[in-house]
Each structure stands twice: as structure tokens, then as C-alpha cells.
């Protein structure tokens, strides 16, 4: 049996929402990594430790941006209703047409 076409009114995530999430993630990534680099370089300069704190700052910036992006994405899915599990019909709950009375 064929599935009915998707209703355009009930699309899960619109184009603008997708662009918003993607641009937020990009800006968050850039800002977090730049701040991590600057803080790491400042610490490396004051503690004379080479570049270890710069690397730690970059990694912390990446983790912070990824965490923030995932939270925004999940909130967007929750808001649009796409986070709900899909209703699927299993073979146990499917109607059995073999047992149907014939005329």
C-alpha cells in the first residue's frame, strides 16, 4: 500500500528554521573557537607554556559550540513536533486481508 503524500502544512522543519539553526551553529563555532584561541594565547603568554593552553582553548571552544548547536537543534525539533517518534504499523497490528470475508 502506498503512503499518502506529505502535507506541506505539517512539514517538520521549515527552510528558514533550518537556515537559522545552521547560521547559529556557524556563528557559535567561530566565536567559541576564536575566544578559546585568544584565552589560550593569553594564558600561554603569561605562563610561558608554549601553545598548550591555545590547543586546550580551541578544544573547549569546539565542545562548547557543538553542545550549544545540538541544544538549539533539539529545541527546534521539539518546537516543530519532529522529535516525536513516528507512528509505524507493525505486522502484528496490520490488518490481515487474507482472513477478510469475500463476497
Image: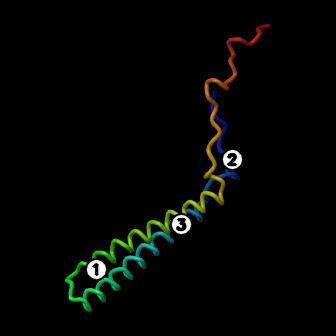
The CA span between labels 3 and 1 is 28 Å
- The residue to which callout 3 is attached is 21
How many numbered badges does the structure rendering display? 3
- Image quadrant where residue 17 sits: bottom right
Quadrant of the rendering where the C terminus is positioned: top right
Q: 101 left or right of 4?
A: right
Residue 63: image location, x then y, percent:
40, 68
* Of 11 and 49, the residue lying toward us: 49
Crowding at dot 1, Cα within 10 Å, few <14 / some 14-19 / many 20+, comes out as many
Q: Residue furthest right?
A: 103
Name which residue lies at 76% across and 8% down.
102
Quadrant of the rendering where the N terminus is positioned: top right
Name which residue lies at 66% across and 60% down.
79
The CA span between labels 1 and 2 is 50 Å
- Of the numbered discs 3 and 1, the one sitting upstream in the chain is 3
* Secondary structure at numbered mark 1: helix
* Of 36 and 9, the residue lying toward us: 36
The CA span between labels 2 and 3 is 23 Å
Query: Which numbered disc, 2 or 3, marks the residue closer to the eye?
Result: 3
Residue 62: image location, x then y, percent:
38, 70
Crowding at dot 3, Cα within 10 Å, few <14 / some 14-19 / many 20+, comes out as some
Amino acid at each position: 500500500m502506498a503512503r499518502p503524500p506529505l502535507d506541506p502544512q505539517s512539514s517538520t522543519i521549515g527552510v528558514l528554521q533550518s537556515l537559522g539553526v545552521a547560521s547559529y551553529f556557524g556563528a557559535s563555532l567561530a566565536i567559541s573557537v576564536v575566544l578559546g584561541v585568544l584565552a589560550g594565547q593569553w594564558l600561554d603568554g603569561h605562563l610561558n607554556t608554549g601553545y598548550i593552553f591555545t590547543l586546550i582553548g580551541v578544544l573547549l571552544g569546539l565542545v562548547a559550540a557543538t553542545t550549544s548547536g545540538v541544544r538549539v537543534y533539539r529545541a527546534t525539533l521539539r518546537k516543530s513536533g519532529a522529535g516525536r517518534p513516528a507512528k509505524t504499523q507493525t505486522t502484528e497490528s496490520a490488518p490481515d486481508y487474507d482472513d477478510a470475508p469475500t463476497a
